[in-house]
Amino acid sequence: VRANYSLPKVDTFVTQFVTKYRSSKFSLDNEEGYDELLHRLLLLRKKGLRLPRYTNNEGESIWEKFYYGIHKYFLYDPDDTYIDKLLHDLGTKEIVRVEQKEGGTQIKLIATFDDDGQALLKPMRYGREQETLPDHFYFTDYERHNAEIAAFHLDRLLGFHRVPPTIGRLLNISSDIQQTCDSKLAKTFFVSPAGNLCFHGSCSYYCDSSHPVCGHPMMLEVSLAAFLPPVHMAKRKTWRNPWKRSYSKHRKA
């Protein structure tokens, strides 16, 4: 008996979908493990073309190997061993230069490593257990550095492989950031009344001495997301995000 809140057209669509899904090569066998499913789907999935500049160039550095592995439909193949090496390098390579990334509403830094690789650095603003106040709009909240890390791992678990490799890392603000940054960012460093080394940079929101990024007293947890190839090596096309959020108190996203 059809439930009194269902619609005949929807019922028909669901029935047709279930029938086609069960006969599809993408359907999940009840006895099949999730890892087995992801591996099978990976074999069925089309890779698409590589980036033209890397078609015949596997590269020597771990960054070049990452760029070589980028295809039309995903950023990396989970079976490629260089991804684990890239994650290791993101977490251990010496940072030789730091500069603030232009644009955006909150502070983000560009970290350059001793092998010329680069990553987007987002600092930890407050603990994972701290929640946004119920009466605050989402755009008045700090960006969460660990959201970048979680997005990478969730993307891997779901088998999409479209989020840049991202890791968490503990940095010394003095040696890893203050001593390697440009003069513009260096001018925003100070020692807080609690004795912690802090900085605030320049941006639209939360970049002043009332909203600093502070160490404990020198150590700071950050996320580091591997940069994509430079524009001259991989041309971009830009589309407006249909789910782009609004920063207005009166207009929905």
Image: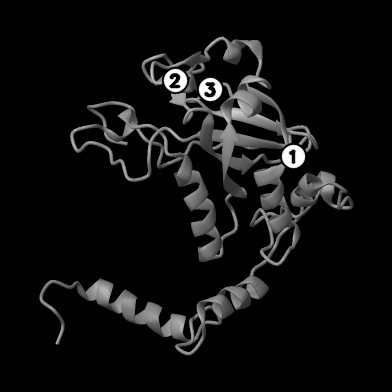
Mark 2 residue element = loop
Is label 2 or label 3 in front? 2
Distance in Å between CA atoms under marks 2 and 3:
30 Å
Q: Badge 1: few (under 14), some or many (20 or more) residues near its Cα, within 10 Å?
A: few
What whole-number distance in Å separates the C-alpha atoms at marks 3 and 1?
21 Å
Q: Which residue is mark 3?
A: 103
Residue topped by disc 1: 234
- Residue 130 at what x, y percent from top left? 31, 41
Q: Residue at x 50, y 45 (%)?
A: 148
| 20, 175: nearer the viewer | 175
Q: Residue flagged by tag 1: what amino acid is it?
A: Ala
- Whether residue 105 appears in this view of the structure is no
Task: Choose between 156 and 71: the one closer to the eye.
Answer: 156
Q: Which sits in the foreground, 46 or 74?
A: 74
> Amino acid under label 2?
Gly
Q: Where is 41 relative to 210, above or below?
A: below
Res 161 → quadrant? bottom right
Considering only order in the chain, which callout, 2 or 1, is on the residue closer to the N terminus? 2
Height in image: 199 above or below 130? Answer: above
Residue 195 image label? 2
Specify the amino acid type for callout 3.
Answer: Gly
Q: Give how far across and how far down residue 134 sits, in percent.
A: 19, 38
Q: How many numbered discs, if any?
A: 3
Mark 1 or 2: in front is 2
